[in-house]
Structure formats: C-alpha cells, structure tokens
Image (cartoon, rainbow, N blue to C red):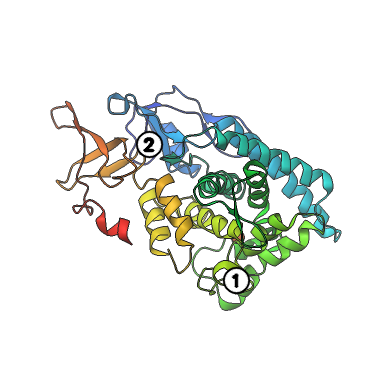
C-alpha cells in the first residue's frame, strides 16, 4: 500500500486501511472501498489529509508501523478516559486517581510489549486522524516513538541511573516507566485554555507564558505517588540541551536522560502531525528538524539513535526524483536513507523500479543531512 494526499487521490483508488474520523470507533470509510468524488470530499472535510491506497504502484509495499491499529485505538481510548477523569479531578483540586494511574500504567505496558516486538527502523506513525483527535493520538504516538527510541538508546548506551552510572539491567521496567511518563507528558495542557492551545499562528508573550506552565501543572497533577522517572518526563520534556528550554532552564546532563529522549519524540511527532492550525509535515522535514537541533536542543546520543530508527522517506511515501518524476518509496536502506528504492509509473503506464534513486534536493546522497 502507499500513502496519497486526499486532495490528489484518484477516483476509483482502493483504500488499503480503514479511515477513522471522530471518536466513535466506527470507520468513516472501510478498507477495500473505491473512492468516489463524494468520498474524496468527505475525507477532506473531515480533516484527513492522507490515506493509504492499493494499486499497481504499491504492490508489496508494507509500511512498518510501531503499533497495530488496534493497540493504537485501545490506548487512545484509555488515555482519553484518564484525561477526562483528570479534568474532573482538577476542578475539585485533586490529582489523578490511583485507578487512572493504574490504567495508564497498563497501557504503557501494552505499548512497551508491542514496541519490544517491532523491528526498529522505517516506522510510520499512521497519521490518518483528523486534527480534532490530535491530543489523544499525539500522546499515543509520542509514547510509542519514545519507547522505541529508549529501547535502542538503552541497549546501545545503557540507561543512566541517579548516580550517573550507565546500566543495562532491568530494561523492560525502565521502558514501562518512560512509557508512562510519555502517556502523561502533556497532561498539564488540560489546564491551558483552548484558545491558547489551538490558536492558529503565533502566541503572544502572555499566551506563551501560560503555555509554558503545562509541564509544572502536569507534574502537580501527578501527585506525590508518581515515580521520580515519570515526573522527570512530565516536568522536563521541554528542556533543551543548551539550557534554553522550560520550565527550569536545565542544561546538558542535568536534564534527565528520559526527558532528553522524550523531547526528541515529542518534537518529531508535533512536526509530522495534523493540527487544527497546520497540516502534517512529511517525515523528511521532521527528521531535518531533529538533526539540525542535535547538540543545541537535543542530546546528540539520542539524535544518533533517532537517525537509525526514523527514516526521512519511509516505504509507501511519494518522493520527487532529481529528474522531475514522481515516485513511490518501496524500501529503504538505513545506511543510505536518502537513496531509497523506488517505483515509478511512466507516461505509457508501465511501472519502473530504481534501486538507489537520486532524489530532488538530495543529489549529493544526503551527505549534508547526515552530517548536520
Ligand atoms: Fe508538552
């Protein structure tokens, strides 16, 4: 299957996956459905910018997802319930209940289990939700990506304990902790007014001030019982390596390793997701932002792991070749992410394959990007 823009989808194209809009759990359109003009309009009107289709170009292309769609929906539902409860608790001045925390911990375990079983490259965060679902979906996707980055970081470099020692024991329980922290990372946003959260365009200085409180509010909402590791993620996921982040302006290793991993996952997902005020940027843009922030915003060790895990041109995506043609990515070699294996439909209708395609803007093979 391959990914096409809803605006450009051809009438008659066949959907390769169910498409959901809203929280009902009932698909807007089902897999196997042929696209008509009316369906095409429905996709656009529901804010679904891209869909997966099956055609002659997409044969054998299997996008690598971190989670099954089922886990994704199940965890999003549980996070939704916990958030609703937290909203209620907030009004009465209480923190998250033990039950809500326990439910979320179960979801963190489920995500961790699933991430343990995925190969660690070329993932695709299936982005077929409309922008209104952003908060829930974002939380689940960031969690999955963060746990995946953590798994690789911990196995390559170890996890850093409170004495600064690098350790390789008890990985699974560390992954569950970072997973729970990630599920809760933006919980403080419940206290931020909607006008500020969803504002299209730039925030004013005062609005920023309000926005920047969410990590601290979130941490307060957790209550005393939440573990130190979970709190570190919630409080410090917006800190920057150079000390220019918030809320505490911590720098370097003073930012907990779990928070350093979380910030990479959070920023990448924010850039590549639909929001009420912006459409999703393609993976190559998200990858560029993470790479250019290495050493300033982000921990280079985490960025190096990220580069092995997230591909700028994942299978199923459309790309522009240097010779002006459009192609679909079939496969990608982690060591040469800017030279993917692609498939092209020629003007006479025939399908052509290129092993190491030269992409527009990456004529040098992406050497610059890799070095950045
Ligand atoms: Fe945040």
- Location of residue 108 in the rendering, given as x and y in whole percent from the top left corner: 67, 42
36 horizontally vs 42: left or right: left
Q: In which quadrant of the rendered view does residue 113 lie?
A: top right
In-front residue for pair 91/82: 82
Which quarter shows the C terminus?
bottom left
Q: CA distance from mark 1 to mark 2?
A: 36 Å
| Residue that badge 1 annotates | 246
Residue under the image location 67 percent in, 52 percent down: 181
Q: Around disc 1, counting alpha carbons within 10 Å, would you say few (fewer than 14), some (14 to 19), or many (20 or more)?
A: some
Residue at the limit of the structure toward the top, as seen here: 32
Secondary structure beneath label 2 = strand
In-front residue for pair 17/293: 293
Q: Which mark is residue 3?
A: 2
Residue under the image location 47 percent in, 28 percent down: 17
- Disc nearer the start of the sequence (1/2): 2
Residue under the image location 53 percent in, 68 percent down: 240
Is 324 located above or below residue 216 in the figure?
A: above
Q: In which quadrant of the rendered view does residue 44 lie?
A: top left
Q: Which corner quadrant of the figure contains ligand 1?
A: bottom right
Foreground disc of the pair 1, 2: 1
How many numbered dots are placed on residues in this image? Answer: 2
Q: Would residue 300 be seen by someone viewing this image from the given angle?
A: yes
Residue under the image location 58 percent in, 59 percent down: 257
Q: Around disc 2, counting alpha carbons within 10 Å, would you say few (fewer than 14), some (14 to 19), or many (20 or more)?
A: many
């Amino acid at each position: 299957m391959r990914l096409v823009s809803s605006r450009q989808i051809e009438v008659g194209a066949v959907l390769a996956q169910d498409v959901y809009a809203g929280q009902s759990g009932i698909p807007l359109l089902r897999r196997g459905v042929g696209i008509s003009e009316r369906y095409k309009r429905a996709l656009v009107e529901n804010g679904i910018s891209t869909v997966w289709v099956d055609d002659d170009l997409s044969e054998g292309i299997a996008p690598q997802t971190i989670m099954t769609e089922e886990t994704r929906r199940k965890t999003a539902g549980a996070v939704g319930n916990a958030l609703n409860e937290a909203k209620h608790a907030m009004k009465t001045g209480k923190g998250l209940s033990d039950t809500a925390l326990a439910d979320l911990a179960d979801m963190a375990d489920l995500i961790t289990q699933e991430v343990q079983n995925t190969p660690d490259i070329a993932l695709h965060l299936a982005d077929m939700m409309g922008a209104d679902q952003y908060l829930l979906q974002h939380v689940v996707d960031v969690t999955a990506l963060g746990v995946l980055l953590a798994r690789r970081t911990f196995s390559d470099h170890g996890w850093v304990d409170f004495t600064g020692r690098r350790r390789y024991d008890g990985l699974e329980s560390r992954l569950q902790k970072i997973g729970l922290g990630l599920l809760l990372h933006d919980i403080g946003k419940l206290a931020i007014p909607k006008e500020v959260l969803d504002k299209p365009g730039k925030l004013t200085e005062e609005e920023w001030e309000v926005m920047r409180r969410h990590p601290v509010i979130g941490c307060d909402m957790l209550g005393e019982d939440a573990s130190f590791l979970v709190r570190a993620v919630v409080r410090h996921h917006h800190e920057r390596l150079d000390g220019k982040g918030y809320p505490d302006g911590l720098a370097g290793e003073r930012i907990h390793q779990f928070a350093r991993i979380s910030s990479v996952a959070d920023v990448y997902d924010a850039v590549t997701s639909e929001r009420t005020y912006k459409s999703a940027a393609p993976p190559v843009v998200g990858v560029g932002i993470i790479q250019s922030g290495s050493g300033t915003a982000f921990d280079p060790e985490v960025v190096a792991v990220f580069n092995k895990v997230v591909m700028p041109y994942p299978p199923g995506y459309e790309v522009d070749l240097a010779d002006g043609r459009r192609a679909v990515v079939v496969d990608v070699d982690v060591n040469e992410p800017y030279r993917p294996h692609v498939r092209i439909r020629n003007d006479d209708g025939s399908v052509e394959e290129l092993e190491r395609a030269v992409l527009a803007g990456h004529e040098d093979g992406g050497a610059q990007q890799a070095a950045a």
